[in-house]
Amino acid sequence: MSWLGLKYTGSFQSRKFLLYSEDPLREVWASIALYGTKDFLRANFKPTDPEVTEWESILTYASVRIRQSVEFQRASNSASPLTSPLSLYYSLLNLLRACTALIFDKLPEAGHGLKFQRGEGLFDSRALLLNRGTFPNYLREMNIFIPVDTPISFGDAVSSRLLKNS
């Protein structure tokens, strides 16, 4: 067991798709950037519901959100430690919105669906889950039910504690 208490060591990559790189993070983002065009999305995604009539607008929306996500991630590389977390947050938000549109065949609601709750320090601060917005809607679509106004810390977000309580 590692000093972090992780029980798994080794690669999380499947044998089907292995990525060898001297800069894996850059390679992953280069792969994500490929999805930033409607033509690439059209070739790789089909609506799960054949009755969907606005698929072209969903592809347009997703391609723009993916490009924004990649640009925010790139911007975080040259930003200061004070600003880069915000760029990474917006990168994640835009990527989640694109994935939500492509997976569930519908445009996500406006707003992120979180409210900041200040703590004494970074790891004590929390986000309250609201009723509407990108994050709560995604969780509901994934059949993960977390009550509204649930405070979520950074530790909760990166651990399985939150899912065990849902």
Image: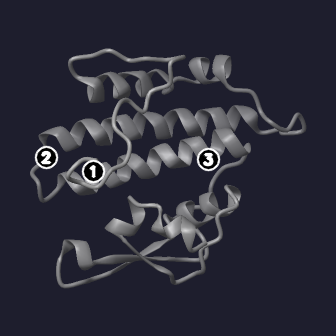
Is residue 68 shown left or right of residue 85?
A: right
* Mark 3 / mark 1, whichever is N-terminal: 1
Q: Which mark is residue 100?
A: 3
Q: Position of residue 62 (x, y in %)?
A: 57, 37
**Residue marked by disc 1:** 87
Q: Nearer the viewer, residue 47 or 142?
A: 142
* Mark 2 / mark 3, whichever is N-terminal: 2
Neighbours of disc 1 within 10 Å: few (<14), some (14-19), many (20+): some
Instruction: Decide: is 61 above or below 125.
Output: above
Instruction: Decide: is 130 above or below 110.
Output: below
Q: Nearer the viewer, residue 123 or 110?
A: 123
**Which kind of residue does numbered mark 2 sit on?**
Ala
Q: Which mark is residue 79?
A: 2
Choose top left, top right, bottom left or bottom right for residue 140: bottom right
* Mark 2 / mark 1, whichever is N-terminal: 2
Q: Nearer the viewer, residue 161 or 33?
A: 161
**Which kind of residue does numbered mark 1 sit on?**
Ser
Residue at 51 percent of width and 65 percent of height: 111
Colour pattern of the rendering: one colour
Which image quarter is the C terminus in? bottom right
Q: Position of residue 117 (x, y in %)?
A: 34, 82
Gap between marks 3 and 1, in whole Å?
20 Å
Instruction: Decide: is 77 above or below 89.
Output: above
Asked if disc 2 and disc 1 are in contact, CB closer than 8 Å, the reply is: yes
Gap between marks 2 and 1, in whole Å?
8 Å
Q: Position of residue 125 (x, y in %)?
A: 28, 78
At numbered mark 2, what does the secondary structure look like: helix, strand or loop? loop
Gap between marks 2 and 3, in whole Å?
28 Å
Is residue 109 shown left or right of residue 85?
A: right
Asked if disc 2 and disc 3 are in contact, CB closer than 8 Å, the reply is: no
Q: Position of residue 31 (x, y in %)?
A: 42, 22
